[in-house]
Image: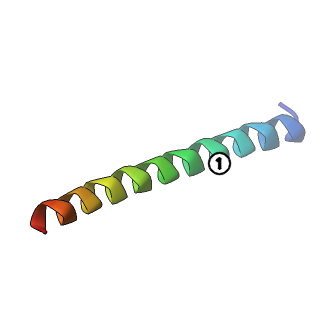
Amino acid sequence: MSLQQWLLIFAAFLAYALALICYEEDRLQGALSFDYDVLL
């Protein structure tokens, strides 16, 4: 495989990981704010 193909795969993996992290943070924030509302 050429270097360009490796970079493309790496970039795609990086974007996927970033999207996953953002999604998880959104879910955690949603859960935290929900617990906070329940406590109030």
- Residue 4 location (% of width, % of height): 88, 39
Q: Which residue is mark 1?
A: 14
Quarter of the image for residue 33 reads bottom left
* Most foreground residue, 5 or 38: 38
* Most foreground residue, 12 or 40: 40
- Residue 6 location (% of width, % of height): 78, 39
Q: Residue furthest left?
A: 39
Q: Is residue 6 left or right of residue 37?
A: right
* Most foreground residue, 12 or 26: 26
Q: Residue drawn at (65%, 45%), measured in percent from left and top?
A: 15
Q: Is residue 31 left or right of residue 39?
A: right
- Residue 31 location (% of width, % of height): 26, 54
Q: Residues within 10 Å of mark 1 (few under 14, many from 20)?
A: few
Figure label count:
1
* Most foreground residue, 25 or 12: 25
Q: Residue drawn at (64%, 41%), measured in percent from left and top?
A: 13
**The disc labelled 1 sits on which kind of residue?**
Leu
Coloring applied to the structure? rainbow
Position of residue 20 relative to residue 36, above or below, is above
Q: Residue furthest front?
A: 40
- Residue 5 location (% of width, % of height): 83, 34
The quarter of the rendered structure image containing the C terminus is: bottom left
Q: Is residue 26 left or right of residue 34?
A: right
Q: Residue furthest bottom?
A: 40
The quarter of the rendered structure image containing the N terminus is: top right
Position of residue 10 relative to residue 1, above or below, is below
Position of residue 10 relative to residue 30, above or below, is above
Q: Residue drawn at (71%, 44%), measured in percent from left and top?
A: 10
Secondary structure, mark 1, is helix
